[in-house]
Every structure is written in C-alpha cells, then in structure tokens.
Amino acid sequence: MKIIITGCGGQLGTDTLVALASCGHDLVSFTSARLDITDAGAVSSVFAAEAPDLIINCAAYTKVDLAETESEKAFAVNEGGVRNLALAAKEAGAAVLHISTDFVYDGSSPHPYTEEDATSPLGVYGISKLKGEEVLREVLPEHIIIRTSWLYGAYGKNFIHTMLRLAAERESLSVVYDQVGSPTWTKDLAGAIVVITNRIEQEASPEGGSTIWGTYGYANHGVASWYDLAVAAIEEASEMKIGTNIICTSIEPIKTEEYPTPAARPAYSVLDTAKIKRVFGIKIPHWRESLKEMLKDVAKMETEVSNEV
Ligand SMILES: NC(=O)c1ccc[n+]([C@@H]2O[C@H](COP(=O)([O-])OP(=O)(O)OC[C@H]3O[C@@H](n4cnc5c(N)ncnc54)[C@H](OP(=O)(O)O)[C@@H]3O)[C@@H](O)[C@H]2O)c1
C-alpha cells in the first residue's frame, strides 16, 4: 500500500515511520519543512504525484497554551490542514488515518470517555482539534480518527523529558496532582497504527471484511496524575541511571490552581479503549510498563551517543 505520513518530525510521526518501515508498505514521509499541510496547493500536488492509498496524519499544531493567543495558527493546521488532506485524499481515492486528542472532552465525566460521549473542549487547541475531526468526517467517510492522550516518546519534547531535565537541575519539584489521565507511549500508539494500517489494506481488497471506519480512543491502560507520572519517571530514570545526575529528592503534589496555565485542561481525561481493542484486536500495555520501556530506549540512545564521542 502506498502511504503518505505527515508530521514525521514530531514525536508520534517519528515512531510511526519507524514502526511502519519494516511492514512492506511503500512509505513517503514528510516533515513540516517538506510538506506544510496548510498549503492546499502543495498538498494537492504531492497527492497527485504520489497517488497514495492512505494518509497517516501525525501533523498538528500542539502548543496547547500558545494556542490561546495563536488561535489562527492552531485552526489553520488542526482544521484547515486536515481539510486539505481530506479533500486531496478524496480526489486520490485514499483513506485518512488521523490523530486527535482527549482535549476534545471537558473532563467532567464520571467514567472513562467513550467515542460516543459528548465533546466540549475547554480551550482553543481542543476546539481546533475537534473541528479537524468534524471536517474529516464531513469530507471523507473512509477515515479513522484516533483520540489519544498524554503522549510521550523517546524523541521530541514532552512531559517526561521536561521532568528529567528539571530533576537534574533542582532538588525539589512541584507537580499537579488533580488532573488525571492515561500517559501514552508513542511507540505503543505507533504499533496500534501498524495494526490498523494492515487492516485498512485488507478492507480495501475485494475480499475485505467489515467496515472499520470511524472514531476510536487509544491510550495506555491505567490512570495517573501528572504528579504520579513525574514520580514514576524520576524513580525509574534514577534506577536506570539515565541522564547526567538527578539531584531532585522531593516532589510536592500541588493543585492546578497553584500552577495556572493560559489554557484550561480537563481534570479527568481517561479514554475508554474497549472499541479499538474489540475491532482491531489490539493489546494495550499498562502505562507503567510502557514508561519503563521508553526509558530503556532513552538509555540506549544515550549509550549510543556516548560511544560515538
Ligand atoms: N502530545 C500530546 O500529549 C498529545 C496528546 C493527545 C493527542 N495528541 C495528538 O497526537 C498527534 C501527534 O502529536 P505529537 O505529540 O507527535 O506532536 P508533535 O511532536 O508536536 O508533532 C507534530 C508535528 O506536526 C508538525 N506540523 C506542525 N504544523 C504543521 C504543518 N502546517 N504542516 C505539516 N506539519 C506540521 C510539527 O512540525 P514543526 O515542529 O516543524 O512545527 C511536528 O513535527 C497530534 O495530532 C496531536 O494533536 C498529542
């Protein structure tokens, strides 16, 4: 299958490209510098030249706080960019696998969010991502939307890397405990994307099975607060001797109101993953196990770098 992957310089894009590389598909990958998805003409030319069967969109405007003052940019990428991809995919007869977010919910649910639960984003980023979902559903029935949460990977900027850096700089840290969700390793999500991609290939063949198009929640199993995640990451990293030297000996749990941010975040954003497991037979690891595996990857990368110098 010919697959275009957008946003390949990001944390999920990097892991998705690696995961798909050994699967026998014909991959064409684009960083933002090579393909700006807000440029309808560029998107259309690339699709005309490549004639893809599937587009995996890992590109997004992801600066949650900055989006509050850069809403035009957020909507240009997260709504306009998705529209460009959907229209070009329709023209090319291709399907789109798109990534969305737990930030489409307001966090007031008493139970893990299912795909049918009402959306009600709290900030510009979440609204722009919801608009992207809506435009994709409107334009192209052959789509998969995966709502995921609290992504971190060995590559790129994320909460884990920030905590490890701060833990090497400060003896004490304060981290919010009253926002809970499911931390999700990009490598696990990339594995799920591979399973779904292979299934899309089967669906497209004449003997293809039942319809799989629609919206799915995917997150690692288990629930944690940002505080829990910080404690676990710093403990594991200390044990594995990752990073130069962790000097942080105290992590204080604080309330959201003690760490105000420009964008409001859902207090509870656990995703129900029953549908994606049922439809695709995907096995999902617990976040603690995945965190360990991700840190092992970081340790391996550090060893490789130190061997090179
Ligand atoms: N990070 C999370 O915690 C989280 C949680 C839930 C859902 N998600 C969703 O998961 C997906 C992947 O997130 P991520 O964490 O991998 O994000 P990321 O690391 O910020 O990567 C996003 C990528 O999109 C690229 N991009 C931005 N504007 C673009 C444009 N106009 N054209 C083409 N590419 C563009 C960025 O390139 P530049 O760096 O060059 O701008 C970056 O490489 C996104 O859809 C995000 O909304 C993320």
Image: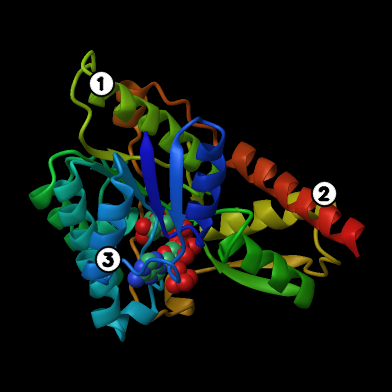
Question: What residue is shown with label 1?
Answer: 205
Local crowd size for mark 1, using a 10 Å CA cut-off: few (<14), some (14–19), many (≥20): few
**Is the residue under label 1 in contact with that under label 3 (CB below 8 Å)?**
no
Q: Is residue 48 depicted above or below 188 in this figure?
A: below
Image quadrant of ligand 1 equals: bottom left
Give amino acid for label 1.
Ser
The answer to whether 132 appears left or right of 162 in the picture is left
Residue 126 in view, yes or no: no
What residue lies at 17% left-to-right and 62% top-to-bottom?
A: 131
Q: CA distance from mark 3 to mark 2?
A: 38 Å
Q: CA distance from mark 3 to mark 1?
A: 31 Å
Local crowd size for mark 3, using a 10 Å CA cut-off: few (<14), some (14–19), many (≥20): many
Instruction: Please state which of residues 238 and 243 is positioned toward the viewer in this rendering.
Output: 243
The image quadrant where one finds the C terminus is: bottom right
**Is the residue under label 2 in contact with that under label 3 (CB below 8 Å)?**
no
Q: Residue furthest front?
A: 49
What residue lies at 35% left-to-right and 34% top-to-bottom?
A: 273
